[in-house]
Image (cartoon, helix red, strand yellow):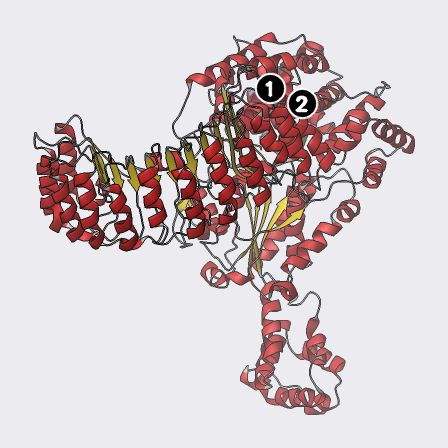
């Protein structure tokens, strides 16, 4: 046969694994075994004295390789050497795999014709040696025991992720990568998948599946032996974050659902994954992955860079001159750590040396580098053509590049170039200077980023009279598409367009400043305020990236002045750098929302920057408070601060630098004892709202906060301390603050372990005549029925408290009965009481009914998520119908109600003239119950304005009845969960 069963081991290895008695038994069985396969027997005299090496030669002499292994495997089973039988079967399967042979040819061609590294393979392999070893270790059977593993290959653009993945695939086909771990490795490219609308996993495999291979279903039935390599996910023009997934590999699906199902382990969960993602896509898609192991493609070291130059420049003198030039420029040397940018820099220097010019590369942002590369390369490739002809051909090249970007095409033919007026002579010239790469009739740019740059250059060069393919989007569409909705294949082109609008870049290209392009971009930015979509928010990070690319402060300032509100998520140092450049240019900003994920943790960003660099950038960003006098609201979300970053922020927010009225720290850690931060609050006479929800406060920090609240200068009216880890030990400090500060009206303490003793202390403050608190939230505070007595006393003595929430505490009927004794008193000023999920039953409704009849002040009562049941509601309805009842809002969602109480509810709705708002979400109403309810809603005496019901939960006939009632009663709204917005706002759990 053309291909050997075994690449490394061979039959001898297996025979040497046999013990002495097993080997003798093997030879004895070999006397008869060939007859079963209708083969000629080997003479016993030769077998008897044969060593292991001799036996291998005898078997090869008498039988074909296939026959040898059929006989050998049969004997292994008879010897009960299942281990050898399984190992041999697996290796035969691997080495006789037609798919593997096919992919070897395919990826050898890719490696030779598309990768085209400007350095020897040996040098490349040395630079990725560490990453390759780590990858093998992660997937090794010793480490995983055959369990599925997801590896996330991380790195910014141009670091060589795609090259690494292609090399890995090639090594698997050659048997040098995980051959004992993976029988099949499948390689998917996001760029190629853009051409596929809908497919099944089986159909996707079939593209590269030789007819002679075994059934794909057989392969997929052993997913633990499969590795999926996913490349170019940045190029996908679909969203992978949808909710729908599928576990059927034969079902045709849209590509986004298919890939999302693979990433989330819904489809073939036993298979392993190897995925390459750039930083932006880690944020966008990383959360889909199940426990991924991160692997970084290492940057080139200075030693690697020097060696790279020696390979790129064959002449030692030129290599030395080029390297010395780069080494003397810190920014260029840093860029050369990126293999793609190193190649571009080398190419620029190569053509400058060839023309005898002084070495020079202008670098501010990447657009400048790509412009330098482009102009040097075009000069080198077009020196035999006239300038006028060169310009025409460059415009044709850029038009073709733009067409490819918009149609997701990276491969072109000579016919495509001729269609855009570019003759073959120019294609040959540009291929000779590494602007283009030609493989037969297939022509590509040397890197997709070069195509992106040329596509952007199209917008700079085009004139109003030019005609072009309507598939190419206008500049407005290019800008809008990326800022409202991420289109990965357009991101880099859009960045280059921003960069090309800068005068300095125009100078590099030898052009006069193109004012028209910058004006078009600014018109797009100014029009963004007119486009407000409910489901889509402006991606400020993408806008900042574009503005940063221009490096023109006047342009950035003009753009930033447009926005009154900005929300941005920062995870990487480069994002912090860009935000710190753009935000201080805002002059009209009124609200700023920041999320800094792990930026200031000790380990975050250690690969890309030092903590000192990040703190410096953070200081620059915080200048937004100093330069923006209109900023009234600042929100910091999901951020871990350290001492230095907190100190910088506190100083920046302090007057006279800012005039904040609202500060929100939502799940922020690192406040320490809060001394600097709360000192800032003290000096803010304008500050009315402070939320620290989810920000864990130690006792010392709570004490610092309370000391601040007691100061006459403090004007805080609303204080949100939910989920701050406040215990009963801190309640004395809180009480002191409540007594001293008569400006504080709203306090949220939900989700804190105050316990019964903490509430006792807190109630002492509520009873004090100087306490002016009006709203108090105590949800999830670990309360029992015991402190209800303390609360009752506070309700009787407080002249200011009008809203109290005790939801999600174990008050029981006993505790509520105690509360009701106070609530019945005319001295109780409470207007709104929330008792959701307090483990109440219908027994408490007698006490509550008495309150409804006797208390004219109570306007709102929420009893949701309690087992009130029909019996309890019937009692409540009797109270609602009483002429003294003054209740306006009643919450009964999830109370176990059925249609049995519908008549009583209907009667109450037509009798109670004050009830405006009733919530019945998640109750078990049948069609008859809905009919009775709708009859009441249509009654002229019904004054209800809001009914909480999810219409979609009912059958079609019932939905029509509810819809008809809503249409007949113009003042009625039937909506799902009408309380939720108010509940979240009161607690500070949802940001504005």
> What's the residue at 19%, 32% (across, down)?
916
Q: Taking 729 as reference, is 890 left or right?
A: left
Q: Position of residue 350 (x, y in %)?
A: 81, 26
Residue bearing mark 1: 498
Give the SS element for disc 1.
helix
Depth check, front residue: 151 or 660: 660
Give the SS element for disc 2.
helix
Residues at marks 1 and 2 touching, judged by CB atoms closer than 8 Å: yes
Q: Position of residue 421 (x, y in %)?
A: 59, 18
Which numbered dot is residue 367? 2
Q: Where is residue 354 in the image (x, y as percent from the top left)?
A: 84, 23
Q: Taking 632 as reference, is 867 left or right?
A: left
Quadrant housing the N terminus:
bottom right
Give the spatial CA distance, label 1 vs label 2. 9 Å
> What's the residue at 46%, 35% (across, down)?
738
> What's the residue at 77%, 40% (across, down)?
300
The image shows a total of numbered marks equal to: 2
- Judge whether 106 appears above or below 683 on screen: below
| Residue 207 visible within the image | no
Who comes first in sequence, dot 1 or dot 2? 2
> What's the residue at 67%, 67% (across, down)?
6
Depth check, front residue: 935 or 771: 771
Q: Taking 285 as reference, is 423 left or right?
A: right
């Amino acid at each position: 046969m053309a291909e050997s069963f075994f690449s490394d081991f061979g039959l001898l290895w297996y025979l040497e694994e046999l013990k002495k008695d097993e080997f003798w038994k093997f030879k004895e069985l070999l006397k008869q075994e060939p007859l079963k396969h209708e083969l000629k027997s080997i003479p016993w005299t030769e077998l008897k004295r044969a060593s292991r090496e001799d036996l291998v030669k005898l078997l090869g002499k008498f039988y074909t390789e296939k026959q040898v292994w059929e006989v050998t495997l049969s004997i292994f089973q008879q010897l009960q050497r299942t281990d050898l039988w399984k190992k041999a079967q697996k290796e035969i399967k691997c080495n006789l795999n037609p798919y593997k042979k096919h992919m070897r040819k395919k990826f050898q061609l890719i490696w030779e014709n598309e990768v085209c590294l400007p350095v020897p393979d040996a040098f490349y392999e040395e630079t990725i040696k560490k990453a390759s070893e780590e990858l093998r270790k992660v997937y090794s059977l010793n480490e995983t025991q055959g369990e599925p593993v997801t590896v996330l290959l991380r790195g910014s653009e141009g670091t060589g992720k795609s090259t690494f993945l292609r090399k890995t695939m090639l090594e698997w086909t050659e048997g040098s990568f995980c051959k004992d771990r993976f029988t099949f490795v499948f390689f998917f490219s996001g760029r190629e998948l853009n051409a596929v609308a809908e497919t099944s996993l089986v159909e996707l495999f079939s593209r590269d599946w030789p007819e002679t291979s075994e059934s794909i279903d057989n392969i997929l039935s052993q997913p633990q032996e499969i590795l999926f390599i996913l490349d170019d996910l940045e190029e996908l023009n679909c969203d992978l974050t949808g909710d729908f997934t599928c576990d059927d590999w034969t079902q045709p699906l849209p590509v986004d659902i298919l890939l999302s199902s693979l990433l989330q382990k819904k489809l073939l969960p036993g298979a392993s994954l190897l995925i390459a993602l750039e930083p932006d896509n880690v944020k966008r898609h990383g959360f889909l992955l199940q426990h991924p192991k991160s692997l970084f493609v290492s940057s080139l070291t200075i030693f690697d860079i020097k060696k790279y130059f020696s390979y790129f420049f064959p002449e030692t003198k030129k290599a030395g001159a080029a390297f010395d030039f780069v080494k003397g420029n810190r920014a260029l040397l840093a860029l050369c750590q990126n293999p793609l940018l190193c190649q571009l820099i080398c190419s620029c220097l190569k053509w400058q040396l060839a023309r005898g010019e002084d070495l020079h590369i202008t670098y501010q942002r990447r657009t400048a580098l790509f412009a330098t590369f482009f102009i040097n390369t075009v000069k080198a490739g077009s020196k035999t053509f006239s300038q006028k002809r060169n310009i025409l051909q460059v415009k044709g090249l850029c038009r073709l590049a733009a067409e490819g970007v918009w149609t997701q095409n990276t491969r072109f033919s000579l016919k495509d170039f001729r269609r855009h007026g570019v003759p073959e002579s120019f294609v040959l010239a540009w291929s000779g200077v590494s602007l283009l790469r030609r493989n037969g009739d297939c022509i590509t740019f040397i890197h997709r980023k070069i195509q992106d740059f040329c596509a952007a250059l199209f917008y700079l060069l085009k004139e109003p009279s030019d005609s072009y393919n309507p598939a190419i989007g206008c500049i407005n569409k290019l800008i809008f598409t990326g800022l409202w909705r991420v289109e990965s294949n357009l991101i880099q082109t859009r960045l280059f367009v921003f960069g090309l609008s800068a005068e300095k870049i125009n100078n590099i290209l030898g052009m006069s400043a193109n004012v028209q392009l910058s004006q078009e971009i600014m018109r797009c930015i100014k029009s963004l305020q007119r486009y407000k979509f409910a489901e889509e928010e402006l991606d400020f990070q993408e806008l900042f990236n574009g503005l940063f690319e221009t490096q023109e402060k006047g342009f950035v300032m003009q753009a930033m002045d447009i926005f009154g509100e900005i929300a941005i998520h920062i995870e990487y140092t480069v994002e912090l750098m860009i935000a710190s450049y753009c935000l201080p240019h805002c002059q009209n900003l009124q609200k700023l929302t920041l999320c800094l994920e792990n930026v200031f943790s000790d380990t975050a960003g250690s690969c890309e920057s030092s903590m000192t660099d990040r703190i410096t950038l953070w200081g620059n960003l915080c200048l937004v408070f100093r330069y923006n006098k209109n900023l009234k609201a600042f929100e910091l979300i999901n951020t871990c601060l350290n001492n230095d970053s907190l100190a910088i922020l506190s100083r920046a927010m302090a007057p006279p630098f800012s005039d904040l009225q609202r500060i929100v720290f939502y799940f922020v850690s690192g406040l320490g004892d809060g001394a600097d931060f709360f000192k800032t609050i003290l000096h803010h006479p304008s500050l009315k709202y402070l939320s620290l929800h989810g920000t864990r406060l130690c006792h010392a920090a709570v004490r610092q906060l309370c000391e601040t609240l007691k100061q006459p200068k403090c004007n805080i009216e609303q204080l949100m301390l939910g989920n701050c880890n406040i215990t009963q030990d801190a309640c004395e400090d809180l009480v002191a603050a409540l007594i001293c500060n008569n400006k504080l009206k709203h306090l949220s303490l939900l989700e804190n372990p105050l316990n019964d003793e903490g509430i006792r202390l807190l109630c002492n403050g509520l009873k004090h005549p100087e306490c002016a608190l009006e709203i108090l939230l105590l949800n999830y505070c670990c309360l029992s029925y015991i402190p209800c007595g303390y609360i009752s006393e506070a309700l009787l003595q407080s002249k200011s408290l009008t809203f109290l929430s005790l939801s999600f505490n174990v008050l029981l009927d006993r505790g509520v009965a105690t509360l009701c004794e106070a609530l019945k008193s005319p001295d109780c000023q409470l207007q709104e009481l929330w008792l959701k999920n307090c483990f109440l039953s219908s027994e408490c409704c007698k006490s509550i009914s008495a309150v409804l009849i006797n208390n004219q002040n109570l306007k709102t009562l929420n009893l949701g998520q309690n087992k009130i049941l029909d019996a309890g509601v019937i009692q409540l309805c009797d109270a609602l119908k009483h002429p003294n009842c003054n209740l306006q809002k009643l919450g009964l969602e999830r109370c176990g109600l059925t249609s049995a109480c519908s008549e009583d509810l209907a009667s109450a709705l037509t009798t109670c003239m004050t009830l405006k708002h009733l919530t019945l979400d998640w109750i078990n109403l049948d069609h008859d119950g809905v009919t009775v309810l709708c009859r009441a809603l249509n009654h002229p005496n019904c004054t209800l304005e809001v009914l909480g019901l999810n219409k979609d939960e009912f059958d079609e006939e019932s939905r029509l009845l509810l819809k008809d009632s809503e249409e007949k009663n113009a003042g009625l709204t039937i909506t799902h969960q009408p309380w939720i917005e108010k509940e979240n706002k009161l607690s500070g759990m949802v940001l504005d």
